Structure formats: structure tokens, C-alpha cells
Image (spheres, rainbow, N blue to C red):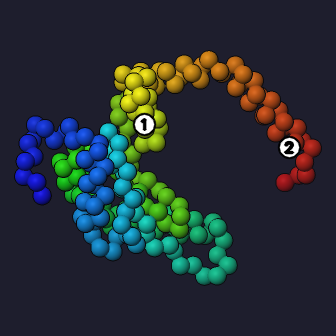
Amino acid sequence: MKSQRTSHHHHHHDSSTAAAESPAWFAGRVPDGWFSAAPTVSVDTDEILVVGAIADVDLAAGATDAERATARAARVSRFREDTRDARMAIADEAQHRFGRRVSWGVDVGGDTQLFTNVAAPVMTRLRQPERQVLDTLIDAGVARSRSEALARCVRLVGRHQEEWLASLRDALGAVEKAREAGPEI
């Protein structure tokens, strides 16, 4: 571990360092047996998202999709409870090292469930992929901040909303007609 870390400086690790180092760091730091392979680690300016695959449920042949979904949800819940203290400790270490909050998720049978997601103040309820859209506008010099980038996106939608709303209404009308004409379900 590098010893040149200064406490007043650690919140300014650039994304490239965190992106380059964190996958290997998490692969080494996460306990053996948690995940069936090294976790997928994605980094943006606020958050490191760590998603690991866990073993799928083993149900009797002929189990329904609903039963499989119930069993997977229970397995995810168990994993979340069993690993909570260790995950929080690892997240604290990572936050010191990389200057970002950590969110966790698991993939079970190809279905990914995220446990927590950082919502930066102006970005309430935006997940990492949406924040990356805003950061792309900033990197491209189109906006100076995320709030400016967000405002630009909203204006763009506003400029097209009349035609979009009109076509949505048409589509909804078509759905209604199809429903009326179709068989009783």
C-alpha cells in the first residue's frame, strides 16, 4: 500500500486512478466465497459500484418463475444480512483509499439487484448510468456542472415534448384500441 496518502487530500483521487486500482483492490479485499468470480467494479466521480455474482438457487424441476424469483430474493436478502458488517468495513476502507462511497449489488441467475445507491444532493435518485450521462456533458465542455447538465437535458426534453407527448398519446390510443378489440384476458 502506498504510504504517501495525506488526509486532507484523499477526496481528490481522480477517476482514472480509482478506476484502474479499485477492481483489483476489491477482488483481493472481498472475502473468498462471497462471489463466484471477481466482482464487477464500476467507478464514477461519486461512487464505486461493486456487483458480484452469487450462486443461483437450486429448485426442484418444474419450479415456476414466481417460485424462482421468491427463492432468489430470499438468497439476496440472506447474503445482504450475512455480509453487512464486513461490507460496511470494506466500504469504509475503500472510501478512505479512493475518496468515494461504495454501493453493493449481487447478480443471481443473471438478475442484478443493487443494495444502495448514492444520491448526490442535486442528483436525487439518479443512478450511476444517469450520472455518467451528465458527467459526459461536463467532460465535453457542454456544461460546467451536473445541475447545469441536468437543466440542459430538461430543456432538450421540453423543446421536443409537444411532438413526443402527441406521439405518446397516439401510442396509448392505439394500445387502448387493441385492448378493446383483443380477447378477454
Question: Quarter of the image holding residue 26?
Answer: bottom left
At label 1, the amino acid type is Arg
At label 2, the amino acid type is Arg
Using a 10 Å C-alpha cutoff, classify the residue at mark 1 as few (fewer than 14 neighbours), some (14 to 19) or many (20 or more).
some
Query: What residue is drawn where x is 7% and y is 48%?
Result: 4
Vertical placement of 47 versus 84: above or below?
Answer: above
Query: Picture coordinates of residue 164 (x, y %)?
Result: 70, 26
Q: Nearer the viewer, residue 3 or 66?
A: 3
Q: Nearer the viewer, mark 2 or mark 1?
A: 1
Question: Quarter of the image holding residue 141?
Answer: top left
Vertical placement of 184 versus 135: above or below?
Answer: below
Query: On the rendered image, what quadrant is the C terminus found in?
Result: bottom right
Vertical placement of 3 versus 179: above or below?
Answer: below
Horizontally, is 10 left or right of 25 in the view? Answer: left
Q: Nearer the viewer, residue 63 or 174?
A: 174
Proximity of marks 2 and 1: CB atoms separated by less than 8 Å:
no
Is residue 100 visible in the rendered image? The answer is: yes
- Give the residue number, with chain letter if any, for mark 2: 179
Query: Picture coordinates of residue 123 (x, y %)?
Result: 41, 32
Report, in whole angstroms, how far the alpha carbon at label 2 lies from the one at label 1: 37 Å
Pick whichever of labels 2 and 1 is earlier in the sequence: 1
Secondary structure of the residue carrying tag 2 is helix
Query: What residue is drawn where x is 42% and y is 42%?
Result: 128
Secondary structure of the residue carrying tag 1 is helix
Using a 10 Å C-alpha cutoff, classify the residue at mark 2 as few (fewer than 14 neighbours), some (14 to 19) or many (20 or more).
few
Query: Picture coordinates of residue 32 (x, y %)?
Result: 29, 73
- Give the residue number, with chain letter if any, for mark 1: 131
Is residue 76 visible in the rendered image? The answer is: no
Horizontally, is 71 left or right of 98 in the view? Answer: right
